[in-house]
């Protein structure tokens, strides 16, 4: 079994740290930028996992037939009850005047909310057709909020392919919720916040930010409890009424690396982000919990005791996949913004060789701890020029390519083994008990290919 070297004593980290001291900037990594044609999904995709999480929310896409097709074909297979998303299709002919379009939107919303009493939060989701861009959805949300207050909270955000890529839809959605929260306990909320135990002087409350599968949230909640932290909230919650209180007594941990706007709005309300790697793999998850332990002055003994059993389970589960993945080359095309934490996990805990790590956008502060853990000289490419990147992929001859659905088929046809990045967003991969499953998402395609070739 291959042991994982502690972060601080890892020779690569030590050499990265000594190299850093000789250079300006947070890391000696080579980050290049590229602009050109992109192959990514739009932000509407986020509805697929957001509607599963916030169980009393409805996502009404104001869009074209293409948008309806994307949302239904991507998410339709998962529906077994009444769906909690739909599309109000706006065509040219609907827009003889903006007033008519607003009337039509109000009519659709009234019809929906009259029929569906279970909906407590309604998102009007903008898209990219020019007819939709002309509509002011934030004013529409305000207008409808007045009409349906206090039973339903109406918010809006954009999932447009012009403004957002793939996971940015979640960021825009969560940012719209934070924006609608009051600035202090004393201000009135249009729907009730979850009751919170009163804080003593100098006490802080912890907020975990980013959509996590319920099973992951429950596991994390248990570990926080074992660390002695009972005042931990997850955002978004399973229920839209369960809104966090965010103020200067709030510290927060990001559970996802693509929440730049959400984090900014939380900070604007006085909260403080705890810098940490993301909870992927045994090492990342340990460091993520450690950041909370340090902020709340939890002793190392208590911390180690709380994480030791799940950490050991994670290391055992990862070890068998390392046998298959070690020294294999991996190439990331930019898609989900999870690429850097995944690359860190695959290189440090599974021994994979990183040929190129493509990322649509890098938030330097949120990813600072992750970047420090990557092997020096890792090539990170921010942005995309898909043709040039395909050429580099061909030269690198990777054993495994992580990419969007649009590139997977052509690459498979050329003989590459691929992993769809979208699967990494749909699958519960965070935390100790998912670390083995995460490793398996990468080892399975290689294993399958080798079995077929034998
Ligand atoms: Fe709709 Fe634009 Fe997304 Fe296409 S890219 S599905 S038009 S929001």
Image (cartoon, rainbow, N blue to C red):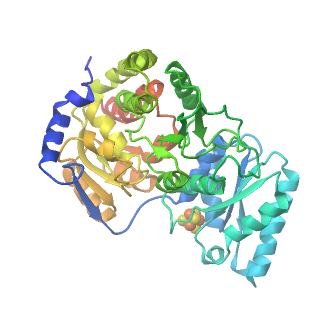
Residue found 24% across the figure and 25% down from its top? 5
Q: Name which quarter of the figure residue 32 lies in.
A: bottom left
In the image shown, does 47 or 389 lie closer to the viewer?
A: 47
**Residue in the picture at 37% in, 33% down:** 284
Q: Residue furthest bottom?
A: 96
Where 30 falls versus 321 (above or below)? below
Question: Is residue 439 in sight in this rendering?
Answer: no
- The quadrant in which residue 60 appears is bottom right
- Ligand 1 quadrant in view: bottom right
142 up-or-down from 324: above or below: below
Q: Where is residue 278 in the image (x, y as percent from the top left)?
A: 41, 38
For the image, the number of numbered tags is: 0
Q: Can residue 261 be seen in this view?
A: yes
- Position of 113 relative to 10 (above/below): below
Residue 34, x across and y down, in percent:
29, 65
Q: Residue at x 49, y 58 (%)?
A: 41
Quadrant of image for the C terminus: top left
Position of the N terminus, as image quadrant, is: top left
> Does residue 145 lie above or below 327 as drawn?
below
Q: Residue furthest right?
A: 114
Instruction: Please state which of residues 68 and 296 is positioned toward the viewer in this rendering.
Output: 296
Where is residue 420? Give x, y as percent: 43, 46
Seen at 43% across and 40% down, the residue is 274
């Amino acid at each position: 079994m291959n042991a994982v070297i502690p972060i601080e004593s890892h020779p690569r980290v030590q050499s990265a740290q000594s190299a850093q001291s000789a250079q300006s900037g947070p890391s000696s990594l080579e980050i290049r930028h590229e602009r050109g044609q992109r192959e990514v999904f739009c932000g509407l995709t986020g509805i697929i996992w957001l509607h599963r999480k916030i169980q009393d929310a409805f996502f009404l896409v104001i869009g074209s037939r293409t948008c309806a097709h994307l949302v239904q074909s991507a998410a339709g297979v998962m529906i077994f009850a009444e769906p909690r998303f739909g599309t109000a299709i706006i065509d040219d002919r609907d827009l003889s005047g903006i007033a008519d379009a607003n009337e039509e939107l109000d009519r659709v919303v009234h019809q929906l909310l009259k029929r569906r009493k279970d909906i407590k939060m309604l998102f009007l989701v903008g898209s990219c057709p020019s007819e939709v861009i002309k509509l002011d959805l934030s004013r529409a949300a305000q207008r409808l909020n007045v009409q349906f207050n206090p039973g339903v909270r109406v918010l809006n955000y954009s999932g447009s392919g012009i403004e957002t890529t793939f996971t940015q839809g979640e960021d825009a959605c969560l940012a719209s919720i934070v924006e609608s929260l009051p600035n202090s306990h004393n201000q009135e909320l249009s729907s009730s916040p979850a009751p919170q135990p009163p804080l003593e002087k100098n006490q802080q409350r912890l907020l975990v930010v980013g959509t996590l599968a319920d099973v992951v949230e429950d596991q994390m909640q248990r570990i926080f409890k074992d660390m002695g932290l009972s005042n931990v909230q997850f955002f978004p919650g399973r229920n839209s009424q369960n809104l966090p209180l965010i103020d200067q007594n709030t510290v927060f941990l990001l559970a996802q690396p693509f929440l730049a706007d959400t984090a900014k709005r939380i900070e604007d309300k006085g909260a403080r982000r705890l810098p940490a790697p993301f909870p992927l793999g045994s090492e990342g998850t340990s460091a993520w919990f450690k950041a909370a332990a340090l902020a709340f002055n939890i002793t190392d003994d208590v911390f180690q005791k709380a994480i030791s059993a799940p950490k050991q389970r994670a290391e055992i589960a990862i070890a068998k996949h390392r046998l298959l993945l070690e020294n294999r080359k991996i190439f990331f095309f930019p898609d989900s913004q999870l690429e850097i934490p995944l690359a860190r996990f695959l290189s440090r805990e599974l021994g994979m060789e990183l040929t190129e790590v493509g990322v649509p956008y890098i938030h330097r502060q949120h990813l600072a701890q992750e970047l420090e853990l990557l092997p020096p000289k890792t090539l990170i490419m921010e942005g995309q020029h898909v043709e040039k990147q395909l050429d580099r992929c061909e030269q690198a001859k990777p054993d495994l390519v992580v990419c969007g659905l649009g590139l997977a088929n052509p690459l498979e046809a050329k003989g590459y083994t691929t992993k769809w990045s979208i699967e990494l967003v749909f699958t519960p991969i965070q935390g100790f008990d998912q670390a083995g499953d995460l490793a398996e998402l990468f080892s399975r395609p290689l294993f399958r290919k080798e079995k077929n070739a034998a």
